[in-house]
Image (cartoon, helix red, strand yellow):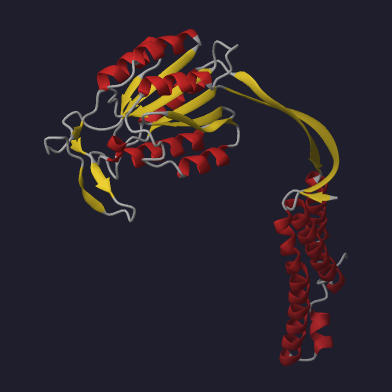
């Protein structure tokens, strides 16, 4: 026998406690009768009461309580083979880890904001494969597409600015690397979510987006940052602020959100653009869009499932309580 909720078996300790309670209650009643007068005389006065029926009712209550606890523990007898299929789409999340993502125009900074939103999205996914790509001047698939959401969140937790040695923000290369991580023979069920401030002076993101479209990839872009600009902090190994990034003339460099290029990328591939806000609703909207998409079979698994038999124990419990109620505590005339 297998138990579906074995934790409830611990409550079986209450059964002997309940039995002892009834015994002590009977002893206390007898002592009370002795105080009021002769017990034999008092028992004759209460001739309509049946002591045997009272004992039987208490025994039935104790046994019924035991079967109730057993039913709550979900006894399982016998097994059956069940086939489960997971259906969904492939979701690759590309996160910008360039130095500009340390700007604090959105708290605590752009990168941490992106990680919080991605973590929340992974928690919502059901049946979809998820992967994580990090990029700066170069791109790297941090976590290949997987159904193991815990593993994806573990890889997400170690994402940090500077983990890509090559500086810069090569969005075009990131889109190409992300497109290449999907199964090429499929022309749908592919989603890429791009989280970046949009500053790219090195590659051609639109050409990469066109190629992604031919491969059936839909790109949703999330712009993180402000258009007015924010200085890029320089953080030492101890996490202390040492100053702000400056250009060759000694002027503080301001990192600005370029939402125009991000809107064009989304438009080209049939996706949508969202601007990151403190309310963190952007990826919720992307999730809603993903749920509307056509799903594909991602995995099939045959497993053994135990069959619940708690109904029998619950039925015995109800039967015993009905008998207990029907017995009553009066003698037959």
**Where is the C terminus found, in terms of image quarters?**
bottom right
Residue 225 appears in the picture as rendered: yes
Residue in the foreground of this view, choosing between 202 and 230: 202
**Position of 31 compared to 266: left or right?**
right
Q: Which residue shows up at 55% across the image and 22% down it?
A: 89
Q: Which residue shows up at 72% across the image and 92% down it?
A: 35
**Percent coordinates x, y for residue 328 in the rendering:** 80, 62
Residue in the foreground of this view, choosing between 18 and 279: 279
Quadrant in the picture for residue 208: top left
Residue 278 appears in the picture as rendered: no
Above or below: residue 316 compared with residue 130: below
Specify the farthest residue to the front: 248
Q: Which residue shows up at 29% across the image and 41% down it?
A: 102
Residue in the foreground of this view, choosing between 129 and 67: 129
The number of callouts visible is 0
**Percent coordinates x, y for residue 295 in the rendering:** 58, 18
**Position of 306 compared to 84: left or right?**
right
Quadrant in the picture for residue 282: top left
Q: Which residue shows up at 18% across the image and 33% down it?
A: 229
**Percent coordinates x, y for residue 130 in the rendering:** 53, 30
């Amino acid at each position: 026998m297998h138990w579906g909720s074995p934790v409830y078996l611990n409550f079986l300790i209450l059964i002997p406690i309940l039995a002892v309670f009834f015994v002590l209650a009977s002893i206390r009643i007898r002592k009370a009768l002795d105080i009021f007068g002769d017990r034999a005389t008092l028992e004759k006065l209460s001739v309509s009461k049946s002591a045997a029926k009272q004992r039987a009712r208490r025994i039935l209550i104790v046994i019924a309580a035991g079967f109730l606890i057993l039913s709550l523990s979900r006894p399982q007898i016998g097994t059956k083979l069940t086939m489960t299929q997971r259906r969904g789409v492939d979701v690759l999340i590309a996160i910008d880890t360039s130095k500009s993502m340390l700007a604090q125009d959105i708290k605590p900074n752009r990168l941490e904001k992106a990680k919080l939103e991605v973590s929340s999205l992974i928690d919502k996914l059901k049946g979809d494969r998820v992967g994580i790509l990090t990029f700066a001047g170069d791109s790297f698939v941090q976590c290949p597409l997987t159904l193991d959401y815990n593993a994806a969140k573990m890889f997400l937790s170690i994402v940090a600015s500077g983990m890509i040695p090559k500086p810069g923000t090569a969005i075009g290369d990131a889109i190409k690397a992300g497109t290449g991580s999907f199964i090429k023979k499929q022309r749908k069920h592919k989603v890429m979510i791009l989280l970046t401030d949009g500053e790219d002076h090195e590659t051609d993101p639109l050409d990469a987006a066109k190629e992604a479209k031919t491969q059936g990839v839909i790109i949703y872009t999330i712009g993180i940052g402000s258009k007015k600009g924010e200085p890029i902090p320089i953080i030492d190994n101890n996490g202390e602020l040492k100053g702000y990034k400056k250009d060759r003339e000694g002027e503080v460099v301001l990192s600005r959100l370029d939402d125009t290029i991000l809107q064009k990328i989304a438009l080209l591939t049939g996706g949508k653009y969202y601007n990151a806000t403190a309310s963190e609703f952007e990826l919720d909207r992307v999730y809603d869009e993903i749920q509307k998409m056509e799903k594909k079979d991602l995995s099939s698994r045959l497993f053994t499932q135990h069959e619940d038999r708690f109904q029998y124990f619950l039925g015995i419990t109800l039967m015993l309580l009905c008998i207990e109620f029907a017995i009553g505590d009066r003698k037959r005339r």
